[in-house]
Each structure stands twice: as structure tokens, then as C-alpha cells.
Image (cartoon, rainbow, N blue to C red):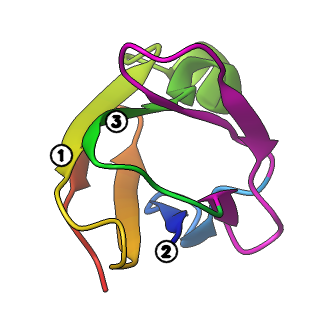
Amino acid sequence: MSLTTHVLDIVKGGGAAGMRVEARRIGVEGVVSVTLDVGGRANLLDTLRPGLHEVLFYAGEYLGSDAFYDVIPVRFMVRDPAQHYHIPLILSPFGYSTYRGG
């Protein structure tokens, strides 16, 4: 199925609109780069294949001078490409949390 993300900026109290996010399958050429919409959401990949994938969240570009983290990498395994994968990120200038969403 697909890969989506949603980034919440807990300082601003809403989506991280305008943040750049990249997605790729490890070991395969090609990177998908998107900019999060006004709600902090994006569809990253329409089709998934089994294997190791990575999402890069460009927090430093988004947060500017308040940033402690530059790029936040999240690596995960796609075992069943028929499932939907959702990788949310909860972000502040000095911390973040992520999980597999629904």
C-alpha cells in the first residue's frame, strides 16, 4: 500500500507545515522528497516493497536557529507491503518521538 507521515510541532501546537521530508528504500536508487502540507501531513510513497526503508525529517531547516536536531532519520522494516505504513513524528526544538501509526 502506501507510506504517510504527520509531524506535530508541540511548541506551535499544530502541524509542521513546510517541513521537508524524504523517503527511500535502503539499497535502492531514488529518493522521494516532499514538503508537509498546512496540517503537517504528506503522502510519501504510493507503493511499498518489502525491505528496509528510511524517512528523513529535516528538523533543522524547519526549526531554524532553535534547532538542536538537524536531520532525524527513522529506519523501519516493511514486511507486508499490502499494509499501510504511517510514521508520525512529534517534535520540539530539543526532543522528538516517533511510532508506527495507523
What amino acid is at disc 2?
A: Met
Residue drawn at x 49%, y 20% as measured from the top left: 67
| Above or below, comparing residue 100 to residue 78 in the picture | below
Mark earlier in primary sequence (3, 1):
3
Q: CA distance from mark 3 to mark 1?
A: 6 Å
Instruction: Specify few, some or many for label 3: CA neighbours under 10 Å numbering under 14, 14-19, or 20 or more.
Output: some
User: Under tag 3, what secondary structure?
Assistant: strand
Q: Does residue 9 sit above or below 62 in this rendering? A: below
Q: Position of residue 46 (x, y in %)?
A: 65, 64
Is 59 colored magenta in this rendering?
Answer: no
Q: Is residue 21 left or right of residue 68?
A: right
Residue denoted by label 1: 77
Left or right of 67: which side holds 12? right
Residues at marks 1 and 2, CA–CA distance in whole angstroms: 14 Å
Q: How crowded is the residue under tag 1: few (<14 C-alpha within 10 Å), some, or many (20+)?
A: some
At 28% across and 77% down in the image, what residue appears?
101
Classify mark 1: helix, strand or loop.
strand
Q: Amino acid at mark 3?
A: His
Q: Position of residue 81 (x, y in %)?
A: 34, 65
Give the residue displayed 66% in from the left and 19% down from the top: 30
- The CA distance from mark 2 to mark 3 is 14 Å
Residue 74 spot, x, y in % from top left: 29, 35
**Residue 42 placement (x, y as % from top left):** 68, 63
Query: Magenta residues, as a range?
Result: 18-45
Indicate which disc residue 57 carries: none
Does dot 2 land on a helix, a strand or a loop? loop
Residue at mark 3: 53
